[in-house]
Image: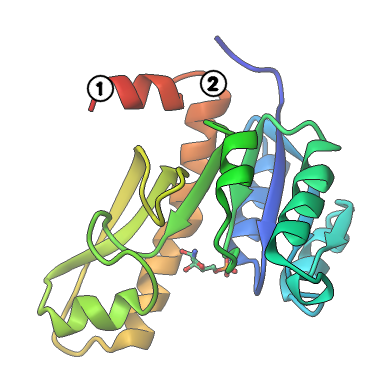
C-alpha cells in the first residue's frame, strides 16, 4: 500500500540537520511525505530557521514554561494532534516523552539514535563506543515505545571506527550516515514496506 503523502510532524531541540535532510529529500521527490509542522522544545533551536526557510509552520513548546511535566505533555499532545500526523518524527528532540504521549501516538513515533542499538542507549554514545574499543559504530532509526531508545528497529547504518577517531570525528561520520538513513526509513513507512506491527511480529 502506498500512502500518497505521509503527513509528518517533526520534533526538534537543536541544529536540525536531520530535519534538513528530510526537507531536502521531500523537495527532490525521493521521500513521499510532507511536513505539516516542526515543533521545538527550545526557542533558539537553529532547526526552526531551517523550517521557516522551507515555509513549514513552526511551534515552540518549551517545558520551562509549564508548571509540571504533565501540563507540558498535555500541551504537546494537543499541538501534535492538531496536525493529524501519520508519523511523529523525533529529530534530535532532547526531551524524554512520557507514557501518555507514547500511548496517544502509539506505533506512529520514530526516533534516530546515534548508536547501533541496543548498544549505548542514552547520551555520549560516541565516547562510549570509543571507550569500549568498538571497531564498528553507527546509527539506528527505530519506533518509539515507553522504554528509552527501545522499540522495533527499522534501519541501521554502520561506520568504521579508526584509531585516529575521537568523539567529534565519530559524531560527524555518524551524522553523515543519519542524513541518508532517516529519510530512507521514513520512505519505507510511507510506502507501506515497514510498520510497527510487522516489525513487532517479526521479533
Ligand atoms: C543526532 O545525532 C541524532 O541521532 C540525535 O540527536 C542528534 C540530532 O542532530 N537523536 P540534528 O539536530 O538533527 O543535527
Q: Residue at x 12, y 78 (%)?
A: 132
Residue 54 higher or lower than 120, as above or below: above
Tell me where residue 52 sits by quadrant: bottom right
Picture quadrant where residue 172 is located: bottom left
Estimate how packed mark 1 is, as few (under 14), some (14 to 19) or many (20 or more) residues with alpha carbons within 10 Å.
few
Indicate the secondary structure of the residue bearing disc 1. Answer: loop
Residue placed under numbered mark 2 in the picture: 191
First of labels 1, 2 by sequence position: 2
Establish if 86 lies above or below 167.
above
| Residue appearing at x 79%, y 37% in the figure | 81
* Residue 104 at x, y percent in the picture: 65, 35
Residue toward you, 69 or 48 = 69
Q: Where is residue 182 shown, x and y percent of the image? A: 49, 48
Give the residue displayed 38% in from the left and 69% down from the top.
122
In the rendered view, would you say 110 is above or below 106?
A: below
Position of the C terminus, as image quadrant, is top left
Q: Which mark is residue 202?
A: 1
Residue 178 location in percent, x, y? 44, 58
Badge 2 density bin: few <14, some 14–19, many ≥20, Cα 10 Å: some
Total numbered labels placed on residues in the image? 2
Amino acid at each position: 500500500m502506498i500512502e500518497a503523502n505521509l503527513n509528518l510532524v517533526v520534533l526538534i531541540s537543536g541544529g536540525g540537520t536531520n530535519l534538513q535532510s528530510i526537507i531536502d529529500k521531500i523537495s527532490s521527490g525521493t521521500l513521499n511525505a510532507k511536513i505539516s509542522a516542526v515543533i521545538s522544545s527550545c526557542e533558539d533551536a537553529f532547526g526552526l530557521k531551517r523550517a521557516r526557510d522551507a515555509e513549514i509552520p513552526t511551534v515552540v513548546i518549551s517545558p520551562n514554561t509549564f508548571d509540571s511535566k504533565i501540563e507540558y505533555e498535555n500541551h504537546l499532545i494537543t499541538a501534535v494532534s492538531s496536525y493529524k500526523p501519520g508519523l511523529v518524527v523525533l529529530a534530535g528532540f532532547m526531551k524524554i516523552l512520557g507514557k501518555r504521549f507514547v500511548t496517544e501516538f502509539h506505533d506512529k513515533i520514530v526516533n534516530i539514535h546515534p548508536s547501533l542499538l541496543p548498544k549505548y542507549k542514552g547520551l555520549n554514545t560516541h565516547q562510549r563506543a570509543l571507550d569500549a574499543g568498538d571497531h564498528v559504530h553507527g546509527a539506528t532509526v527505530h519506533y518509539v515505545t515507553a522504554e528509552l531508545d527501545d522499540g522495533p528497529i527499522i534501519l541501521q547504518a554502520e561506520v568504521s571506527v579508526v584509531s585516529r577517531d575521537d568523539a567529534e570525528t565519530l559524531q560527524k561520520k555518524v551524522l553523515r550516515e543519519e542524513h541518508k538513513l532517516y529519510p530512507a526509513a521514513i520512505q519505507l513507512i510511507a510506502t507501506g514496506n515497514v510498520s510497527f506491527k510487522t516489525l513487532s511480529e517479526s521479533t
